[in-house]
Amino acid sequence: MLRLIPFFTTEAQLIAALKRGESRAHKIVYERFAGKMMAVCTRYCANRADAEEVMLDGFMRVFEKIGQFREDGSFEGWIRRVMVTESLMFLRKSKQWRQEIPLEDVTVEPDYEWADTSLNESDLLRLVNQLPDGYRTVFNLYAIEGYAHAEIAEMLGISEGTSKSQLSRARLLLQTNLKKLEQESERQTNQTNYYEKTYRKTAN
């Protein structure tokens, strides 16, 4: 006898199947959103293995808590919030998540609009992943997820002032690291130009 596999033509049908606990729906949701949610978790957990663990725990939480999803909002947005929450729970277990860098180690003046606008997504992600956990967490919540400082303070159990301070320090450190990248790029370009000129003179 041919076994029929349930097919969900709308998101509402898929969510209903999730609420019934159907494993096929679990598989579809995972396959549909895993890539995007891995990117979310990677922004908080710079170690890819940790990010994957958080993502898997996040999907388990999604399946367990699907009954709490109100279908008047974005399903993907709800999953994303679950992933952010799981990421924060993971970071709280780390003693390093509040890590800071002394201001004397940061060598540029703050440009408070820069960090949100001047880099493409891949370059920004690479620089953000190099930040200490505390800086990276607040920067992600504020600049990427769009939370206000009051919300971040409540989520992390810190004061609004600490949230603002972490964000400012994150932006300063991002600018410092960008400056280093620009200097290295300029050095490599000058070196390449020198070799090309030397080669042309030798060829002539």
Image: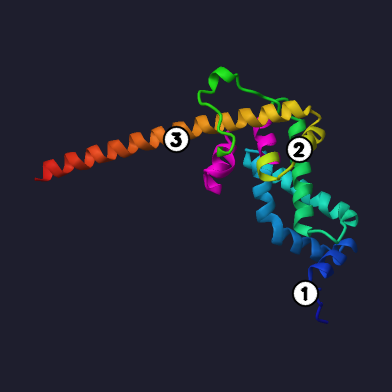
For label 3, the SS is helix
- Residue 8 versus residue 181 in the image, above or below: below
> Can you tell which quarter of the image residue 134 is in?
top right
Mark 2 surroundings within 10 Å by alpha-carbon count, few (fewer than 14), some (14 through 19), many (20 or more)? some
From the top left corner, tell me how far across and down residue 97 is, in percent.
70, 29
Q: Which residue is mark 1?
A: 9
The count of marks equals: 3
Q: Nearer the viewer, residue 67 or 149?
A: 149
Q: Which residue is mark 2?
A: 88
- Residue at x 75% of width, y 44% of height: 84
> Can you tell which quarter of the image residue 132 is in?
top right
Secondary structure of the magenta portion, mostly? helix
Q: Is residue 72 left or right of residue 49?
A: right
- Distance (Cα) linking label 1 and label 3: 47 Å
For discs 3 and 2, the disc positioned in front in the rendered view:
3
User: Residue 130: which numbered mark, if any?
Assistant: none
Mark 3 surroundings within 10 Å by alpha-carbon count, few (fewer than 14), some (14 through 19), many (20 or more)? few
Q: Is residue 12 visible?
A: yes
User: Magenta part of the protein: which range?
Assistant: 115-141
